[in-house]
Image (cartoon, helix red, strand yellow):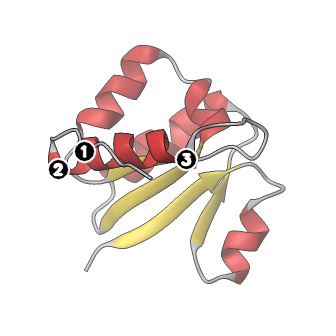
Amino acid sequence: MFKFVVVTDPDTSPGFRLAGVEAYDAAGPWQAKELLASLSAREGIGIVAVSEELLDGLDEKFRDRMERLRVPIVIAIPSRLKAADRRLYIERLLRKAIGYNIVMRG
């Protein structure tokens, strides 16, 4: 059985831990990169959720490498600071998961 883990900023990680999720603190993108490299090499981790701010700070080559992994799947936790269209975010996740673009209406 695969585990779900979170990589986020030190202010947010305690909330995930209180919810019973294994959470790792990253002070910045450089630390997130180290954690992602380490977590992607560990057995038993199926999904790594990373705060969007940390993912945006990673170099494109490393992000592409993480996106191509079959296991673990690396997903972004939407930023509460950015005003984003949630439908587009969900469509992007679905496209990544199943390989098809699904357009949501409504």
Q: Secondary structure at mark 3?
A: helix
Q: Residue furthest front?
A: 106
Query: Which residue is denoted by mark 1 in the rendering?
Result: 102
Disc 2 and disc 3 in contact, CB within 8 angstroms: no
Q: Residue at x 56, y 71 (%)?
A: 22
Judged left or right of residue 102, residue 92 is right
Query: Which residue is denoted by mark 3 in the rendering?
Result: 86
Is 63 in front, or is 102? Answer: 102
Q: Residue furthest top?
A: 60
Q: Image quadrant for the N terminus? A: bottom left
The percent position of residue 89, horizontal first and vertical second, equals 47, 43
Mark number displayed over residue 93:
none
Find residue 14 and report its image quarter.
Answer: bottom right
Q: Residue furthest left?
A: 99
Q: Amino acid at mark 1?
A: Ile
Q: Which class describes the residues within 10 Å of circle 2: few (<14), some (14-19), or many (20+)?
A: few
Give how far apart the Cα atoms at labels 3 and 1 are: 14 Å
**First along the sequence among labels 3 and 1:** 3
Q: Secondary structure at mark 2?
A: helix
Taking the image as drawn, is residue 31 in sight?
Answer: no
Q: Which class describes the residues within 10 Å of circle 1: few (<14), some (14-19), or many (20+)?
A: some
The percent position of residue 49, horizontal first and vertical second, equals 50, 54
Q: Amino acid at mark 2?
A: Ile
Disc 2 and disc 1 in contact, CB within 8 angstroms: yes
Query: Which residue is denoted by mark 2 in the rendering?
Result: 98
Taking the image as drawn, is residue 93 in sight?
Answer: yes
Is 87 in front, or is 15? Answer: 87
Q: Residue at x 61, y 65 (%)?
A: 23
Instruction: State whether residue 63 is above or below residue 73.
Output: above
Find residue 44 and report its image quarter.
Answer: bottom left
Q: Residue at x 16, y 41 (%)?
A: 100
The percent position of residue 63, horizontal first and vertical second, equals 41, 27
